Image (cartoon, grey):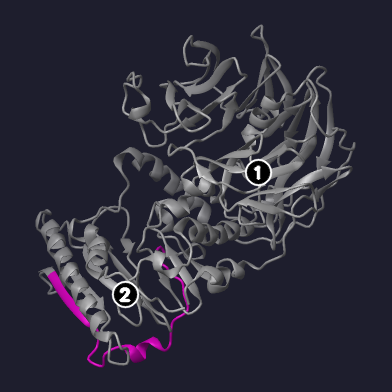
Amino acid sequence: MRIDRVKKCMGLGILLLMTGCSAGVSTEPESGTQEKLQKETQIEEESQSGQEWQQEMESPVQVVEEKNDLAAGLDSEDDDFFVQCLQNLNQGNNITYADGYYYFRSQAENYSLCRTKGAGMPVEVVADQIPGSIYVRENQVYFINVSDSRTLYCVGTDGSGLKKLSDFPMQELIVLEDKIYFRSVYDRENDPFYQLTEEPVEDDRYLYSMNLDGTGCELLIPKVCMKFMTDGEWLYYLVYEEEYVLYKSSMDGKEEETILHTEDWIRDILPYQGDLYWVNGDQKQLMRLNTQGEEKILASDVWRFTIARGQAYVINDEEIRKVDLMTGEESLLAEREKAIENGSENREDTYPWYDGSDNRGIFVVNGQIFAKYYESEEKGVLWHVLDGETFVVFEDMEPMAVEELVLDTSLLHEANFYYPGRTDENAMQYLDTDGELRYEESFGTREDGSTYGNFRITLPKFNSELDSYEQLNKQMEGLMELALEDKESFFQEMDELDEDEGFTWYREHDYSHLYVGETYISMHYSRGGYDGGMRAWENSLPLIFDRETGLMLQMDYLFTVEKSIYMKRLTGAIYKYCEITGMDWWNDIFDNNVLVKNLGDLRCYLTPDGIVLCYERYEVQPGASGNPTFEIPYEWFADIFKQ
C-alpha cells in the first residue's frame, strides 16, 4: 500500500540521528552501573564462548508416586486474598482463576493476556498486552502491563474498556481491599516527607502503596527492598545491610521491627496462617519461622515453592513434591529426568521446570497444579497442568521453526558488529557511476610515514534510475555535513591527548545493506571507531526512505497500527526465538520489556526478507556481546505492515 502523505522530517530526523555525533557520544555506561556491567561482561564472555544448540528433550513427564489429590475450589484455609495475591506471587502471579475462567499470560498468543475455561478449551485474547501479575475483581482484570513499562492497567473480563490507571512502574501486585502494595523505583513526588536521604541507584526498588484506581501513590519504606510480602496485617520486607535482614512493619510503614538476620540469601517469602516461609537460597532449604521466633527446616533441595490448603508444593530442576506443613511428610508428585548432553548447560530443556525467573515456577490455581516448562524446539515453553497421573499441555500451539521468528541475528556470531540480512543484489544499479560520497582525513603522521587518528566517511550517491534520486542525494549531502562536524569533535579529542596515546584511535562513518524495494529504500548507516577503553565501538543509525518522495521515514510510518502493537508483535518473535533456542538471558530482558524500551525511532532497517531491529551495546546484554540485532521475516507482521 502506497504512503499518501509523508511529513517532511528530513532535517529534524537527521539532526536527531546525529545529535550524539557532534557531541561525542560516550559508549560507556553511566558510572553508577559501571562495576555491575563489568561483572556481567566477564560472566557473558565466559558463557558465550562455548555455546552450542542442543537436541529436544525427549523424556516424558512421569508421576512416580501419587495422583493429584487437590480438589477444585477453595476452602476456609485459603481465602481469596491469599489465592489471588500471595499464593503464586513468587512465580510472577501471571495465572489466576475467577468466574469459570483461567486468566493467564499466553505462551502461544504472543504473550498476551488471555482466558480459557480449561485445558484444551478455546483461548480468548482479553488484551493484546503482556501482563505481569494478574488480579481479578468482579468484572475487571487488573494487571501490570509489561508492554507499557510495567504500569497498572485494567480491562473488562470480556476484553472491553482497556484503561491505563497509573504511569508509575510496579514490580508486584498485591491487592488488599482497595490498596495495592508493590515495589518500584524511587520517585520524589511520592515521597512528600523526604524519607529517603541517600541518592537512589537505578536498580534500587522501594516499597509503595497505591489506590486500586491508580491514585494516591505513597512511599512506605525508604529502604531498598529486595523482596516483600504481607499477610494483610504486617508488611514483611527483605533488606541487605552487610547481611540479609527481614523486617516487618505496620501497613503504613510505621512500627518497624527486625524479625530475622541471616548471612544466607533468601529466595522467596510467603506468610501463611501466622507463620513465615521462605527458601534459603544458599542451602536450597524450605524454612519456616513460627510466631515464637523458632526456625525449622521443612524440606531440602527446594528451588521454588507455593502453599495451598496446608501443603507446600516445592519444585527443583527434576521433581515436584508435596510437603505437609504440620507433619513434614513428603510425597513425590511428578518427576522429569534432566537431560545433560555435551554443551547443553544453557538449554531450556536442561532445566525444564525452573530457570530462576517469572517464566518458570509452580502454581496452584483453582485447586490444580500448573507448571511452565520447555516443551520442544518447535514450541518452546508452554503451560502444563497436572491431570491425574501426568502433566498435560494446558495451552498448545502449532509447531514452528525458529526461522519463522528470527531469520538471522548477531547473537549467533562471535563478531561484535555483525548486522544480519541478505544482500539486495539489485541495489547497485541505483548508485551513481561516479561512485560514492567519500571523505578521508588523518589527524597526524608517524615518523615512518603511516597515519593515525584516521577519519573516514562513505555514503551512497544515487542515480536517475530512482525518481527521487535528487532528494535522496540532498539528504546524503546533509548527512555528510553532520559527519564532518563529528570529525571536528574527534580531532579536538585527539589534540588533547598526550603524545603517542592516540596512535590507535580512529573514527569512521559507513553504510551497508542498501536495499531498494518497491516502496522503501533502506540502509544500515553506522558510526564507529576506537578512542580508548576495552574495545572498539559502533552506533547503529539505520535509515529508511520513501522510494517515491525520497523523504526519510520513522518507524511508525511502516505500520498500520500504533507502536505498542507492532513492537509487541516484533519483540514477541524475538522473545519466543530466544526461549526456543535456549538463550539463558531471555527472562530478565522479557520481564523488563527491554527490547521495546531501548529501541528508538531510527533503529531499524529493511532487507529483502524482513525488518532488522538494532540495539546498542549494553542495551540488551553486556558489552562483550556487541550490538544485538534481529532480522524478523515479513511473514510475521505482514498484516500490519504498509506494503
Of residues 508 and 574, which is closer to you in this image? 574
Answer with the quarter of the image where residue 331 lies. top right
Look at mark 2 in the image and give the residue it sits on. Answer: 511
Percent coordinates x, y for residue 463 in the rendering: 27, 90
Residue situated in front as seen by the camera: 84 or 157? 157
Q: State whether the magenta stretch is mostly helix, strand or loop.
A: loop
Residue that numbered label 1 is attached to: 157
Q: Is residue 292 visible?
A: yes
* Gap between marks 1 and 2 measured at Cα: 49 Å
Camera-nearest residue between 198 and 168: 168
Residue 118 in the image: state x and y as whole percent.
79, 47
Numbered disc 2: secondary structure: strand
- What is the three-letter code of the residue carrying label 2? Tyr
At label 1, the amino acid type is Thr
Q: Position of residue 196 (x, y in %)?
A: 35, 22
Q: Is residue 352 above or below residue 7?
A: above
Indicate left or right for 451 with 573 as reference.
left
Where does the image place residue 609, in percent across and percent down from the top left? Answer: 51, 77
Instruction: Name the residue: 21% across, 62% down.
Output: 505
Is 280 covered by the magenta stretch? no
Q: Is residue 380 above or below residue 513?
A: above
